Structure formats: structure tokens, C-alpha cells
Amino acid sequence: MAAKKTVRSEGGAIRRVAVVGGGLAGLTTTIKLCEAGVPVDIFSLVPVRRSHSVCAQGGINASVNTKGEGDSPRVHLEETVYGGDFLANQPPVKGMADAAPGIVYMLDRMGVPFNRTPEGLLDFRLFGGTLFHRTAFAGATTGQQLLYALDEQVRRFETIDVVDEVGMTIAGERMVRKFEMWDFLSMVLDDAGRCVGMVAQDLKSMQIKAFPYDAVCLATGGPGVIFGRSTNSVICTGAAAARAWRQGAIYANGECIQVHPTAIPGADKLRLISESARGEGGRIWVPKDQKDRRAPKQIPEKDRDYFLERQYPGYGNLVPRDIASRAIFQICFHEKRGIYNDKTTKNENEVYLDLTHKSEAFLREKLAGILEIYEKFAGVDPYHNPMKVFPSVHYSMGGLWVDFEKDASGSLKAGSPRNHATNIPGLYAAGEVDYQYHGANRLGANSLLSCIYAGMVSGPAIASYRQSLARSAYDLPTSVFDDAEVRETEDYQRILEQNQGKDGENVYQLHQELAEVMLRDCTIERDNAKLDKVIEKIGEVEERLKKVKVDDPQERANQNAQFVRNFESMVGLARVIAQGARNRDESRGAHYKPGFPKRNDAEWMRTTLARFKGEGQAPEFIRSFDYECAGQSVHVTDEVDVSLVPPRERKYETAGAASATAAKKEQTHG
């Protein structure tokens, strides 16, 4: 019996997989696929080294316990699901926590310049949601260092030729090909609803092209631009995920949006001041007296309100981000105790983040990257003056629904094609674009870890799925791809031509209007009456979108037309987020409703599952569905797997509350 062809199709074409996104999740997925002998095409909106992962600052979590504090992967699991308010399925979190030390050591071997102790060991800092030194870091530019290290590994595969089933090198066919400055437009689906390729647009020439692939993995990041200015890059629109959703992919927990407590304003976006600033001893405060107009250095300790330390003495400035953001919001919005501004003669929505009690040498060693950002954009020396910060939209815990298969130990079954599979056969998702690891709130420094771990899981899963295929996408009739290409080309022409010769709507003004209501009424505090108005506004924007006019008709690098297309997708995703928030009548993690201040496990310990129903229609929220993966029929419900850590009330007033159960188990079971 002849060996099954895994490299060439029946027609002789090289069978490839597409990875959309060049950040940490996309690069790691690519590496693991190449190690499995699967050729990959990477598509990226920007040069890979400009992917949003480059902006991450503080570090990556791993329970190595070099400081002998009693930390362990079990404690890391415990604190992650506790910090996420028990909305995360626990087996994937266990797999991530168990793999974390090995991932950090792997990155170290790749040449990431992690900070070290005087003894030469990897150094670890504190981060929110834990009292253990668990966060490995490379100064305050950890994301950049990790991204560059992984990109170097991928570049190696760009120089290696594909080898076929019998060991013959196929000259000129590289293991990795990069398509930078290309935009994902849609999946190509066959008659059975299987993803067999994708359509993309070259953002330089504006050429639209369909590509066959045995599988597609989206690693396209979060939807921060829906909220206007955020800490996300301006490319983080969520449009790729929204397009997959419109083609049938389930979107999960969309309402769970994280607001980071410390950012500085900017005209185009908000600049993050990493949680590492608090991990290295930074303190948040405001004057005790609402009318205090003194400069911060003139305000003595007795006249300062270190309100996080006062309200949460167990964790102080290291409480999780949702708690810190709500506390700052309470101080500024409800108590009107923000920082007084001489120019506006009022208290602004700002608080002080103070590092001035630390030596300049210490700060330059540990935090130079972020302090340089503050100095550049705020024009103030943060080494000797407290920084002014306020919360900003930062991260989406929700995303495309992806599956997992549990093994006997309660972790993930290695190599299962179900791991990170969406409900569309052949479509996978990894990184912030998926919903898997963080529940209702993400702990700081778990993002870089979850992106890399997702890639390490997705690569083998896609290889297994591809192995199961009876027929390659490359052996399908070309009409399948031609039709998809024509459909997207016609849609692009519609955008270019609509309302020409008429007074049309300005898409940027529409975006600003939508972003304003999403930011104001769908972030830190949520009220059902206001959410109803948000949903009403989304409907209005959808109608006005039909009247948008593209003012730039150019054939090359047409950013105006591209943004119109992206915004059409963003509006649909905004509806998923807002309607999901309206439905969830409880407070859990980053989702906070003052009208429903308690967590309601009896009714809402379940995953929000949103399915597209049609243009202009409200999404359908479902409790279960069935899908097929590698010939296996899978039944999925919205039940959350809490088999490893029993849910309990979430409190941070007492030191070590999050890890008490895990520590006891560690002592009991050794």
C-alpha cells in the first residue's frame, strides 16, 4: 500500500497551511507546524516584527519558584482561574500553567535577554493577582524581545526547502512564505462547510486573491479599536474574527473586555504603563483633600490616599486589573477626587502612579522601556515625578470559540485535532483572538504565555487534523476558489462605488461616534438601560454605514476603503459585545454591573456563545451546538469545566487569598 501523501496533493501541489497573524501566537504556531513537516504561509497586516505583540511590556508568567516562595504550576492554575472569576475552562489553563516553565527556558535558549539575578538565575518580578515572584522579564520590553526571538526561528524556516514523503528536497519551495501587508477577507468554504482556504488582499496593490489551504489558523489579536483609542495598536480592529463569525464561527464571552488601570492619553491611541511598574513597587494615590492643588512632590505622605492599599491591604497595588480599574473609576468619576488641573481648573480623571521612592538606577535597570514612553509622550520625567494615569481598554478575554480535548490528568490531550479548533472544520484560532485561557479577567503577564502556549498546542492540532483529511484542499475544483475571489472582489468594488456623486457619511466620524458610546457605557461599569441605548446606537450606525462614501478612489494602498470594510465587520462584533453584556445580569471579573453586584453561579457560570444570524440582525445566543472535527462529531455546551479548582467567592482583601487552596493541596500531596 502506497504511503499517504502529506506534502504533495494528488495533483502535485505543495499542501500548505495558512497562519494569519505574525505575533507570538502566529509565529509559535508556524514553528510547531514546521517542526511537524507542514509548510506554512504567514499573512500579516504589517511587517511581522510590527505585530501588536511587540507592544507588551511587563513579562511572561512561569512558576519556576527560584525565590523559594512555594510557588508552583498548581498555584499558577489556581490563581489564573480565581482571577478570571471561574469562567475559564480549567484543563487548558492547567496545560498552560504546567508548560510555562519549559516555555520560559525555551525562550531563554532562543536568546531572549531576560533579566537575571546576581547569581545568574532568571529573575522574576511580581505582577497583579499574585504575591509570588512569577513573571520573567526583559526589562520593560519583554514582548519585543520575545517577538524578535520567535521571528528569528521562523526566518530559519524561510531558508529551508520542503522535503516530500520520500525524503526528496523540493527546490524553491520554502517551509515558510511570508505575505506581509495582506488583509484576511474571508474563509473559502467547500460544500460541506469545511474551511479549505482563504481570500486576502494585498494592501499595496489592492489585489484580491483566493488561496487553497488544508487549514487556516487565525492569530489576529483583539478588537480594541472598536472602543476607539485603547492601548491596542491601530491594526487591532477584530475584523478578521468578525468575518469568521459572519461565516459561521461561534464567538464566545465577547462581553469580557479588560480595562487596564494605568495608561497615558495620546491623540491616536493610549500608551500603556505596564503593571510591572506596580510589580516593582509603584504606588497609586490621589490627594486626600479633593481641593488640594499642590504639585504632587509638595504633598506629604499624610495627605495622600493610597486607596488600593487602604481598600485591599492583602494585595495593595497588586490587585487584578478589573479591581484596580474599578477603584480608580470610583475615585475619579463617583467621588470626583482625580488630580486637579490648573489649566482646566477642575479635577481630571487621573491618578498618580508613583515610583519616585525608588532609585533612578533601579528604575533604569527594571523599567526603562516604559518610563521612556511616559517621558516622551507626557513630557515629564517619571524618575523624579509621579506619573498621571487612567484606565484604558486593553484586552479581550472573549474571542472565537475554540475546543479542547482533556486527557486523564485533567490537562490537554497532546496532538488532539480538537485543541484550538473552531466549530468550522479546518479553521483554528490562537492568541487573543480566541477565548480559551482567561475567563472573565486576565491576570497580567498571562497574555504572552497564553499566546505562545496556544501556538504550541495549535501547531500539533492542525498537523493532526491535516493528517486526517481524505482529500486535500488543493485537489478541489478551482471554481471553489474562483467564486470566493469574485465575491470578495465585487464586495470591494461595492465599497469603492457606493454613494459616489452623493453626499455620503464619513466612516471615521461614524467610528468615533460608535467608539464613544462603547467606551463610555460598555467598559468599566455597565447598566442595562445604557446598554439598550448602545445597542440602539449600533443599529443606527449599521443603517448609516450603507451611506458611507469612500473619498479616496486610488488603486494602490487605499486605506480609506480598507477601513470601511474593517468597520463594517467591527460594528457586527460591537453588537456581540454589547448584547452579551446586556444579557449577563451579574458581575463577574471585568464584567461589572452595579445593578447586579454579585456573581451568580447558578445562572451565569456558563460561556456566552454567539452565532451570526444575518446582516443587521441581533446575534443568536445559544446554549449548545454540534460540530465535526477530523471525522469526529462533537457536542458542545456552554457549561464551564471547573473540575480542578472548585469555585468560591473572589476576594483580595486578605494576602494570599487566591492561592490558599492550591498551597494547601501542594502541602498535602507534595
Image (cartoon, grey):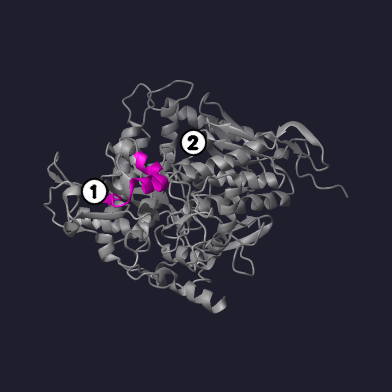
Q: At label 1, which amino acid type do we have?
A: Glu
* Whole-percent x, y for residue 273 in the image: 35, 46
**Quadrant in the rendering for residue 377:** top left
- Does the residue at mark 2 contact the one at mark 1 (Cβ under 8 Å)? no
Q: Which residue is mark 2?
A: 50
Helix, strand or loop at label 1? It is loop
Residue at image location 63% in from the left, 36% down from the top: 155
Compare marks 2 and 1 and give the one earlier in the sequence. Answer: 2
Tag shown at residue 314: none
Q: Judge from the rendering whether residue 194 lies leftward or rightward of residue 181; answer left or right.
A: right
* Whole-percent x, y for residue 633 in the image: 64, 60
Seen in the picture, residue 155 relative to 624 is either above or below; the reply is above
Choose between 475 and 293: the one closer to the eye: 293
Seen in the picture, residue 83 relative to 402 is either above or below; the reply is below
Q: Which residue is mark 1?
A: 350
Image: magenta residue range? 351-373
* Whole-percent x, y for residue 386 in the image: 26, 47
**Quadrant in the rendering for residue 326:** bottom left
Please rate how many residues cluster around mark 1, counting C-alpha atoms within 10 Å: few if below 14, some from 14 to 19, many from 20: many
* Position of the C terminus by quadrant: bottom right
Residue at image location 79% in from the left, 35% down from the top: 169
